[in-house]
Image (tube, rainbow, N blue to C red):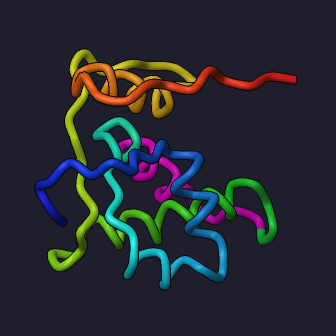
C-alpha cells in the first residue's frame, strides 16, 4: 500500500461495488485510489460476516470487502489510506469520512448527495 494521497477518493460502497465487477483486476492495476481508515474498518466488518447465504446482500458485501482489503494489504499496490479524525459513526460513516478527508486536504469540492 502506498503512502501517497491520490486524487481519486473512494468510500466503502464505491469500493465494494467495483470490487464485485469483472473489471476489478484491471482497475487495481491501472488506478491509484485513496480511501479512509473508516472505510477500511467497514470493509473489515463486512469481511468478517460468518457464513452469509449465497447470493445474499451479506455475501456481496463480504466478497467485495475481502477483495478491497486484499488490494490494500498488497505492498506493491498504489492504493492508499488516509486517517480521518474525528472518526464519524453511523450508517454513512464511510461517506462522511471521505467528505472529511476532502475538506481536510483543502482541495476540490464535494458533490451534493443525490436523493430520489
Residue drawn at the location 57% of the way across and 26% of the way down:
111
**Residue 80 at x, y percent in the picture:** 23, 56
> Is 46 contained in the magenta span?
yes
In the image: residue 92, left or right of residue 101: right
Q: Quadrant for residue 18, please give it.
A: bottom right
Residue drawn at the location 40% of the way across and 32% of the way down:
98
| On screen, residue 75 above or below 95 | below
> Is 75 contained in the magenta span?
no
User: Which of the pair 77/110 is nearer the observer?
Assistant: 110
For the image shown, how many numbered marks are present on the structure? 0
User: Which of the pair 50/95 is nearer the observer?
Assistant: 95
| On screen, residue 79 above or below 22 | above
In the image: residue 12, left or right of residue 31: right
In the orientation shown, which residue stands out farthest toward the right?
116
**Residue 9 at x, y percent in the picture:** 39, 45
In the image: residue 64, left or right of residue 9: right
**Residue 39 at x, y percent in the picture:** 40, 42
Range drawn in magenta: 41-53
Residue drawn at the location 66% of the way across and 74% of the way down:
21
Q: Quadrant of the N terminus?
A: bottom left
**Residue 48 at x, y percent in the picture:** 47, 56
| On screen, residue 103 above or below 8 | above
Q: Quadrant of the C terminus?
A: top right
Amino acid at each position: 500500500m502506498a503512502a501517497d494521497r491520490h486524487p481519486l477518493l473512494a468510500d466503502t460502497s464505491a469500493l465494494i461495488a467495483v470490487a464485485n465487477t469483472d473489471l476489478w483486476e484491471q482497475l487495481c492495476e491501472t488506478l491509484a485510489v485513496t480511501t479512509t481508515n473508516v472505510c477500511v474498518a467497514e470493509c473489515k466488518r463486512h469481511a468478517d460476516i460468518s457464513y452469509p447465504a449465497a447470493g445474499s446482500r451479506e455475501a456481496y458485501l463480504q466478497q467485495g470487502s475481502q477483495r478491497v482489503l486484499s488490494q490494500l494489504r498488497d505492498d506493491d499496490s498504489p492504493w492508499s489510506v488516509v486517517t480521518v479524525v474525528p472518526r464519524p459513526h453511523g450508517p454513512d460513516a464511510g461517506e462522511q469520512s471521505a467528505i472529511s478527508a476532502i475538506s481536510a486536504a483543502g482541495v476540490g469540492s464535494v458533490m451534493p448527495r443525490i436523493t430520489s
